[in-house]
Amino acid sequence: MPAGGCLFVIVGTDDKPIYQAEFPEARSQRREDTLHLNQLTVIHAALDMVDELVWGTQAMYLKQVDRFNDFYVSAFVTASHARFMLLHDARNEDGVKQFFTDAYEAYVRLLMNPFFDSGAKVPASFDQRIRLLGKKHF
Amino acid sequence: MASEAERKKVALRRLGDATFSKVDKVSAELFSLTYGAVVTQLLKDYEDVAAANVQLEKMGYNMGVRMVDELLAKASLAQCASFSETAEVVAKVGFKMFLGVNVEVAAATSSEFRLLLSENPLAEFVELPEECSKLEYSGLLCGVLRGALEMVQMRVECSLLRDTLWGDEVTEIRVLLKERLVEEFVDDDE
Amino acid sequence: MLKLRRPPCFSQLCAAQRVVSQSAFAFLFSEMIQYSQTRVNTADELIAKLEDAGVGVGRRALELACWRERSSKRETRALWKSLFGAHADSLQKVQDSDDEFMIVEKEPLVNAFISSAPVNCAAFVAGGRTPSPPESGRLGRRLAAAQFPAEVSAHDNEEGATVLLIKFAPEVLEREKRQA
């Protein structure tokens, strides 16, 4: 993950990851596969924090839920308990919140399509939308 | 003559609006999501797009047969003098009363017309996956038209020519009159 | 090559609650029942099938209703109203039982047009006969989606009203106690 970059993961209602994206987009060759794995582990650990925090509030946006070295994990939980997790290395609260809000719209739109079910592959249109949002906010 | 036809269209549009405003309503999402569940269930059951298309049309037919009664009961309609007038009734009263949408008629002749839907409550949120690109998602509507018109003595063939789900600008349904089931118009009972 | 369709404008499309005629829904729903009947052998299978169909609808409707509120709150109260146009006639706690609630509906929409069905079609709305996963059916899914695992089933009561019986999973009650 380049400096100023983010890793975005959506974990579905049934705890399965359904989508993942990196901003800005990863460059041609990924050398840091292991680093990437670590990042996922950090997000995974933060999920437990989210599942604790979520009962204390009705708000979808949970702000920063965890910190790991120079990384922050921010989270957003939807009504049907899909979890949006964002790993970022810069404090950018407004950007993150705005990104989550926009991503929520994209997610609802994805969900409203009867052909989408959480086991299925996310269509390209959703990926495009999220990447546009990534460009816009980060 | 043309102005007469225009006047009729305006009157039908008003009738459609008035009828829709007085019927009970449900949320459009409940409707579209339920339909989505039906379509995906059919695809699961038949595992074949063409077979699902046939079944959707058939379900529409069964609905149309019953829907026409409600249309005739709720909207006070004069007897249609021509097939193109039937087209206007279908578009401006039928579609309006059931789905609340405005539908345009195009290329109406004495044996054919086309319906142009710019909004379609059935398909609002749908994006067809690649493997279902041949799916006639709104084929239900073709069936409804066939069933409803058959009940008023018109045997028609309907097909989905264009669909916004296929990337087209509008959804277009062609209705071809094959046969009038009785020679003369039946007098309206009401 | 399939051109990806871009719906007009999602925000616009969904910002307002839009409606279709209730009878259009009823005709569709009854056709769905007719079709489902041809694919099952027993009433229980039919119930399961209806519940199945209800699951996806419930989850989607919940998410859309919350998104539309634009409050960024996880709030489920609005859902029933947004789907069925009115709150259920009453929500009652079952006497002598901590974990059971009932929603009584005098005339559920889905049953309003169907008199000859062999089962109560509100199964579509309720669900949850199968213990695992407990969250089938629309209401069950609604609750489960909002992280209240519960069994929901549809019954007829003596007065002919439809009762949705909700039985929460034990961990929900424990959590509620913890938080109280």
Image (spheres, coloured by chain):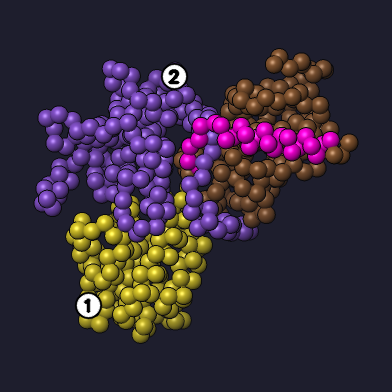
Return the residue at label 1: A68
Q: Quadrant of residue C8?
A: bottom right
Q: Nearer the viewer, residue B90 or A30?
A: B90
Q: Residue furthest right?
A: B1
What distance separates the C-alpha of mark 2 from that of mark 1? 61 Å
Q: Colour of chain C?
A: purple
Q: Position of residue A12 (x, y in %)?
A: 33, 56
Compared to residue B85, the image places residue B48 above or below, namely below
The region drawn magenta spans B4-28
Horizontal side of C176 relative to B22 (left or right) equals left
Quadrant assignment for the N terminus of chain A: bottom left
Q: What residue do we see at 44% from left, 19% from top?
A: C115
Q: Is residue B19 magenta?
A: yes
Which residue in the protein does label 2 denote?
C115
Q: Inspect the image, locate mark 2, and give the three-letter code of the amino acid beneath it.
A: Ser
Q: Amino acid at mark 1?
A: Phe
User: Which chain's colour is brown?
Assistant: B
Question: Is A25 rendered above or below residue C151?
Answer: below
Direction from residue A116 to residue B104 in the image, left or right: right
Work out whether residue B83 can be spotted.
yes
Please tell me if label 2 and label 1 are on a single chain. no
Q: Residues within 10 Å of mark 1 (few under 14, many from 20)?
A: few
Q: Residue at x 80, y 39 (%)?
A: B6
Seen from the viewer's position, the closer of residues B50 and B137 is: B137
| Rendered residue at 70%/25% (across/down) | B77
Chain coloured yellow: A
**In terms of secondary structure, where does tag 2 sit?**
loop
Q: Is residue B43 visible?
A: no
Judge whether residue A58 is colored magenta: no
Report which quarter residue B99 is drawn in: top right
